[in-house]
Image: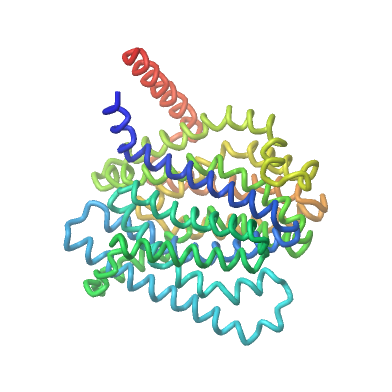
Amino acid sequence: MWQRVYNLIKNKYFLSLAGNVIMSGLGLITMTLIYRALSPSDAGTWVFFQSILLLIDTFRSGFLTTAFIKFYAGADKERTAEVAGSAWYLGIGVTFMLVLVSVSSLFFLGNIHDEGLVLFFKWSGLYYAFSLPWFLGTCVIQGDQHFGKLLYIRLCNQGSFIVFIILLIIIGKISLPNVLFAYLFSNLITSIYALVKGWTRIADLRKRTKASVKEIYNFGKYSVGTALSANMFNTSDTFIINFVLGKPALAIYNLGQTLMQLVEIPLRSFAVTAMPELAVAYNQNNREGVIQIMKKYAGMLSVLLIPAAIIGCALADLPIYIIGGGRYAGTEAANVFRLFLTFAIIFPPDRFFALTLDVIHQPKVNFYKVLVMLAVNIGADLAGVYLTHSVYGIAFATVLPISTGAIIGYWALNKYKAFSFWNIFKVGYDESLVLLKQITRKRKLQN
């Protein structure tokens, strides 16, 4: 029995899923503490600040992560050192530019009147500098498929932030600026931890090559589109709500949206484990295998989300109250969560279409797809706000850009290998039954 438990814990799929479950849980705890400690206006400011911060950081993470794993995973010792060093070179370059923008903006802060923007321009440079080592450490760890180490880094980052927030609450010093300082310090601690553990491969910086730098750059300048697709729409929503409906409305909308981490958990976990499988099939020139793997993961997630969405819609008010407290009970937050859950079934196809396009060397398609989706999202958001004058218009509008992205991704993948869109759900249903039978059989054998 203990051997089976040990094997399960060491399994990369379990570690990936467990890591995302734990981190999403810690993220919800963090949001609960912040929402209950700060006013709706300050909570909205924090949401706006983080949205901009993480969107801009997506240019760095989206630019490097997929390209790094693609060229690093499974390579020989000399090649991995070359890729790691080249990624560090590019990472330092991108981070330097982000820090330079932050420093330069200090001369113009007096002309900026939104508090969230002031926080971003004033402090974002420190965040990007502090987070660079641990970010590149996660790239190395994912490339090596050591998901246990990835969990340790994430626990250090999110766990230390929660500890700082709790300490601020205990000593009565909780405030928006102090939450920001705690956030910066937690990122610095995490980078020091990754460097001390030797997980960043920073010493390989001297082994970079011009060819490898160019290779990563040429792939990354388009693969960034995939990462942006998961972030940009939320950020455009955030901007429109912040400047049209106000920060309290943003806090309400974000509370309902935050619970969608329950959907993001399996999406992120399956994406991390599916990418190496897709890469292997592609490198073997197995087009049928690439599409079958994509359909399996996208279909299973879509099928599994149906009962989850039904349960979530029925119980939506409960988590809203637990996280936000009484001040958010009876607001639009619960219904925003219900609307997102209703649309969630089309999230997996869009996400895995994008991932597969990256693997088959079509990141350029993803880049242009994101631009189209962003235009659709902004137009739909503005129309939604104009018609409803509430966050409901933003929530309803979400289905349009996601559907647009799925259609474009489906069209592009069909040029690689023809397949039926609806067959994704059939494959997902069949694979889910197979998985259920395997679990039932194992339980019978154990008994």
Who's the residue at 31% across and 71% down the image?
A: 214
Q: Considering only vertical position in the picture, is 253 above or below 298?
A: below
Quarter-of-image position of residue 306: top right
- Residue lying at the far bottom of the rendered structure: 107
Task: Please tell me which residue lies in front, 127 or 205.
Answer: 127
Q: Measuring from the top left, give residue 316's x and y in whole percent.
A: 69, 35
Measured from the top left, where is residue 3 in percent x and y?
26, 28
Q: Which residue is at 56% across, 64% downward?
A: 182
Q: In this view, does 22 lie above or below 138?
A: above
Question: Nearest the camera: 181 or 200?
Answer: 181
- The answer to which quarter of the image holds residue 246 is bottom right
In the image: residue 159, left or right of residue 281: right
Q: Can residue 375 be seen in this view?
A: no
Above or below: residue 428 compared with residue 437: below
Q: What percent of the width, then of the height, locates residue 79? A: 20, 62
**Residue visible at 42% across and 59% down?**
223
* Residue occupying image coordinates x 42% and y 61%: 190
The C terminus: image quadrant? top left
How many numbered marks does the figure carry? Answer: 0
User: Which x, y percent locates residue 281?
Assistant: 28, 42
